[in-house]
Amino acid sequence: MDRYVTRVRTDKSGLWSRGGPRLSQLDIELTERCNNNCLHCYINRPAGDEKTRRREMSAARVGEILREAASLGCLGVRFTGGEPLLRDDFEEIYLYARKLGMKVVILTNATLIRSRIADLLARIPPLAPLEITLYGMTRKSYEAVTRTRNSFGKAMAGVNRLLERDVPFVVKGAFLPANAHEIRAFDAWAETIPWMDKPPSFSVFHVLHARRERSKNRVIRSVRPGPVTGVKVLTRDPGAYLKDLRIFLKAFAGKRDARLFTCGAGMHSCSVDAYGRLQPCLLVRHPETVYDLERGSLKDALGNFFPAIRKREAENRSYLERCARCPLRGFCEQCPGNSWMEDSTLDGPVEYFCEVAHVQAKALGLLKGEERAWEIADWGKRLAGFSEDDARKRLEDSEWMNAPSLDEAQKHKGGPDGSQGRSGQDL
């Protein structure tokens, strides 16, 4: 590893003492193609789509972007897709990022983690755990989601190769009808992975497809859980849920704001799609928020283009009357990205996410009956009286944790399909 990096304390490096914009994190979507065809996916193009492949940035172009990112102080990059390991030149891109000293996060389905890739990651560590999304605990449930034969076996083989080489990774899930009965078993299996320090996160409230044709949206809507069911999944571990919630409440709850962007998108982080276009984040692809890197630079985008976008305020009357006045920002996934995915605007209220936010607030005792959050006048008083201990009791004692979809989990000996992990440890 020493051949590729020089260790320097960030506070002594001078990277962030220079004038101009600073970049701390970059996402690069290396491809939209994927070797799975998941029901809920808003991205994937077929793995063999040659027209799409020819449009993708070359490894050299990715390297140019990484070099500029490094010059702006960027210490970490996330490679995502589609399935990033589909790229024939993935190793070249990965090694270049590591040579620049960057921490690399790889988002993958693990099906293409063959011995060569696993050996590379063991020899030259990414310095951050891989993030692997798995879609079921059995071949039947997994491939009902991916709609791809043998994908379960390939994913489990990839996981085992990482375990054998002590390459750190964490697992995530996607909550769908085909695997809803397995969520407890998935949590239990995840506990056996050495690098998991909290329950696995789940993609629950699946976003729609908004890149070209929207024909997938009917299927995505059909597999979205109802808000109550989804919140049961989020709160299945009350302690972990409340720990994360505490951060969001402190940062967002009760703050009324008409600005479109109240998150950190486009400030010190941004994302590049597979064709070299820059967005504030992976979801925001409205034409007015996309920057053409072929005609400009990361420095210009961060210093001029994104700051101008972040000053924009909502114009949608419904948004101004509801979202801009709503104190549930700590619960709600309302954002320009999801507005774009749902209805091709930047400020259209997303009813689905609004209901999810209200269900969470009711589960915690912050709302009652049919109250709508934007109509509450005494929110500050309610928030001041909020007790985590009382909320935990509500979540543990109420009907939320008694959902059949969570309690009727299949019982497994060993791991998925009974497979065994390293040294007899359950996988």
Image (tube, grey):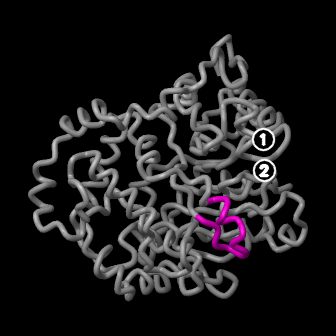
Q: Amino acid at mark 1?
A: Thr
Residue 341 point in image, percent of width and height: 56, 71
| Marking on residue 348 | none
Tell me which residue sits at (72%, 58%) in the image. 82
Q: Which residue is most to the top?
A: 424
Q: Quadrant of residue 395?
A: top left
Residue 72 point in image, percent of width and height: 52, 69
Query: Measured along the vertical axis of the image, is residue 149 above or below residue 58?
Result: above
Mark 2: secondary structure: loop
Of circles 1 and 2, the one toward us is: 2
Viewer can see residue 113: yes
Mark 1: secondary structure: loop
Tell me which residue sits at (27%, 59%) in the image. 251
Residue 181 point in image, percent of width and height: 57, 32
Query: Can you identify the residue that label 1 sits on?
Result: 111
- Please say if the residues under marks 1 and 2 sit with CB atoms less than 8 Å apart: yes
Query: Can you identify the residue that label 2 sits on?
Result: 36
Q: Nearer the viewer, residue 422 or 339?
A: 339
Q: Amino acid at mark 2?
A: Asn
Q: Which residues are magenta?
A: 208-220
Cα separation, mark 1 vs mark 2, equals 9 Å
Lower sequence index among marks 1 and 2: 2
Query: Measured along the vertical axis of the image, is residue 160 above or below residue 313?
Result: above
Dot 2: within a 10 Å radius of its alpha carbon, few (fewer than 14), some, or many (20 or more) residues?
Answer: many
Residue 8 point in image, percent of width and height: 49, 49
Q: Nearer the viewer, residue 412 or 7?
A: 412
Viewer can see residue 91: no
